[in-house]
């Protein structure tokens, strides 16, 4: 399973057009409860440009994952002397906006930390580097705008995980899994542990509870257990 996006391009695009949206709101004297809610009309040039550039970032991210998967397949085939069969691939986005029809209206649905879960649509809900992940099938739940969670979700922020967790307890939760050991932190979060533990299993919610809580949105069809983890 590969988790990779547009390599910061998408965030740059979003920030640039958010600033344009703030300027638009000020120009049109639109009163917003919070600047984060600034928007660009989709029928204006700035809005159309954002949609174009966002879709470019999404396509770039998708191609990025495809190419990494191609390298992975080549290496696995080489390792197993070609005695391997690759089945269906699932390649999905989780930070994006899409024009969809819901409740009889065309709406821009913004999925942040969420993925599409239309009826019969195959998706992925990751756990963590030390816990299972799930391949799921969407139920097309209308109340969720046909969406489900992108993953288990964080129980701790990145900084809190590095502050409060120890290398010893993180290693214990990764027993039996091959992985690159914890890297040194660029910032020292605590005097006695200068390691980046932001992706440790304990930093995430219990994946079983998360799946259980959204059985009205998806059907879990395959449970994947981690054997090895490589963080690029």
Image: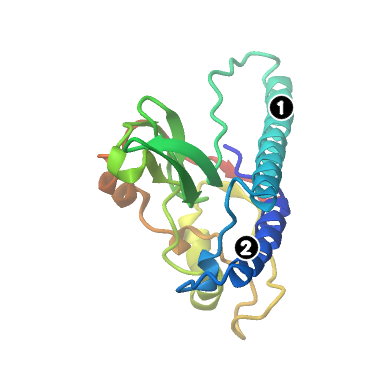
In contact (CB < 8 Å): disc 2 and disc 1 = no
Labels 2 and 1: the sequence-earlier one? 2
Q: Which mark is residue 21?
A: 2
Q: Nearer the viewer, residue 176 or 126?
A: 126
Counting from the top left corner in percent of width and height, residue 216 is at 25, 39
Query: Could you tell me how far apart the alpha carbons at marks 2 and 1 are, in whole angstroms?
Result: 38 Å
Q: Disc 1 designates what residue?
A: 70
Counting from the top left corner in percent of width and height, residue 67 is at 73, 31
Seen in the image, is 23 located left or right of residue 207?
Answer: right
Counting from the top left corner in percent of width and height, residue 22 is at 62, 68
Counting from the top left corner in percent of width and height, residue 148 is at 38, 43
Residue located at (50% from left, 39% from top)? 99
Residue located at (49% from left, 77% from top)? 164
Q: Quadrant of residue 221?
A: top left
Please rate how many residues cluster around mark 2, counting C-alpha atoms within 10 Å: few if below 14, some from 14 to 19, many from 20. many
Seen in the image, is 194 located left or right of residue 113?
Answer: right
Say which element carries label 2.
helix
């Amino acid at each position: 399973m590969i988790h990779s996006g547009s390599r910061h391009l998408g965030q740059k695009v979003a920030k640039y057009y958010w600033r344009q949206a703030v300027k638009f709101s000020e120009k049109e004297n639109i009163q917003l409860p919070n600047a984060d809610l600034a928007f660009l009309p989709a029928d204006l040039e700035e809005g159309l440009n954002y949609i174009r550039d966002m879709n470019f970032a999404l396509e770039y991210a998708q191609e990025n994952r495809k190419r990494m998967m191609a390298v992975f397949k080549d290496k696995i085939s080489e390792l197993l002397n070609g005695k391997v069969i690759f089945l269906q691939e699932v390649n999905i986005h989780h930070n994006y906006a899409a024009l969809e029809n819901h409740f009889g209206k065309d709406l821009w649905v913004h999925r942040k930390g969420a993925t599409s879960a239309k009826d019969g649509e195959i998706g992925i809900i990751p756990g963590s580097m030390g816990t299972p992940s799930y391949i799921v099938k969407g139920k097309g739940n209308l109340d969720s705008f046909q969406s489900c969670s992108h993953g288990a979700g964080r129980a701790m922020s990145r900084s809190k995980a590095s502050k409060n967790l120890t290398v010893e307890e993180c290693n214990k939760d990764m027993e039996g899994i091959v992985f690159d050991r914890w890297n040194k932190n660029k910032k020292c979060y605590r005097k006695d542990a200068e390691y980046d533990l932001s992706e440790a299993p304990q930093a995430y919610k219990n994946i079983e509870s998360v799946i259980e809580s959204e059985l009205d949105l998806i059907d879990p069809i395959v449970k994947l257990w981690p054997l090895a983890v490589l963080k690029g």
